[in-house]
Amino acid sequence: MNEWDGNVNFRNQRGKNPLLIIGIVFTIVGLTFMIVGMIMLINAKKKTDACTGEAKATVIMLDEAYSEDEDGHKSKVYAPVVEYTVGDETYTEMSPVHRSPCKFTVGQTVMVHYDPADPHVMIIEGDDGTKFLYILFMGMGGFFALIGLVFDISGVRSKREVL
């Protein structure tokens, strides 16, 4: 059973402050998002550092996929598929980034940066859509952690007021 003392000090019978619990949950979720964003950013940096080879590539097609929003509306998104040659071997690779509108057109010549140890690993110059995802994860994480800290501080203050 919950008790209310007429102020903002709402507690359950065991004396646990919901503000503090909510704050801890928000802080943990926020820090998790920030850590995931940082890990993704570090992995992207490693890939960028490894992709030291350069080759001209041709966009040979746009891979179509569908993106669905929270209301169930579907829209087409596109990822460029490029073909490039390293040594005597030709590689056909698709960007991991699907977007609408697509920044690339079929037949367009682009520069790719590939990993000389594994030329299948490549980055299309100018295809930087994943950076937004890392920033989004870290920004959302920071926002949730900040909200959590506000709840934590409020919970601690209300606990002190009761004591």
Image: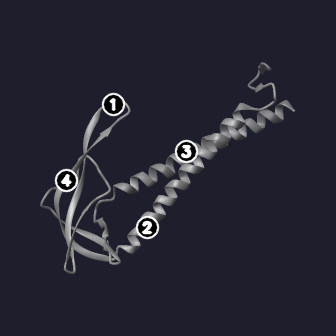
Residue matched to label 2: 45
Q: Amino acid at mark 4?
A: Leu
Q: Amino acid at mark 2?
A: Lys
User: Residue 65, percent across and down?
Assistant: 26, 45
- Mark closer to the chain start, 3 or 2: 2
Residue matched to label 4: 62
**Do the CB atoms of the residues marked 2 and 1 lie less than 8 Å apart?**
no
Above-or-below relation of 125 to 96: below
Q: Could you tell me how far apart the alpha carbons at marks 3 and 2 are, in whole angstroms? A: 24 Å
Point 45% across, 53% down: residue: 135
Tag shown at residue 72 = 1
Above-or-below relation of 153 to 129: above
- Mark 4 Cα within 10 Å, few/some/many (few <14, many 20+)? some
- Mark closer to the chain start, 4 or 2: 2
Taking 45 as reference, is 91 left or right? left
Residue matched to label 3: 143
Q: Nearer the viewer, mark 4 or mark 2?
A: 4
Q: Nearer the viewer, mark 2 or mark 1?
A: 1
| Label 2 element class | helix
Above-or-below relation of 109 to 156: below
Taking 12 as reference, is 58 left or right? left
**Do the CB atoms of the residues marked 3 and 4 lie less than 8 Å apart?**
no
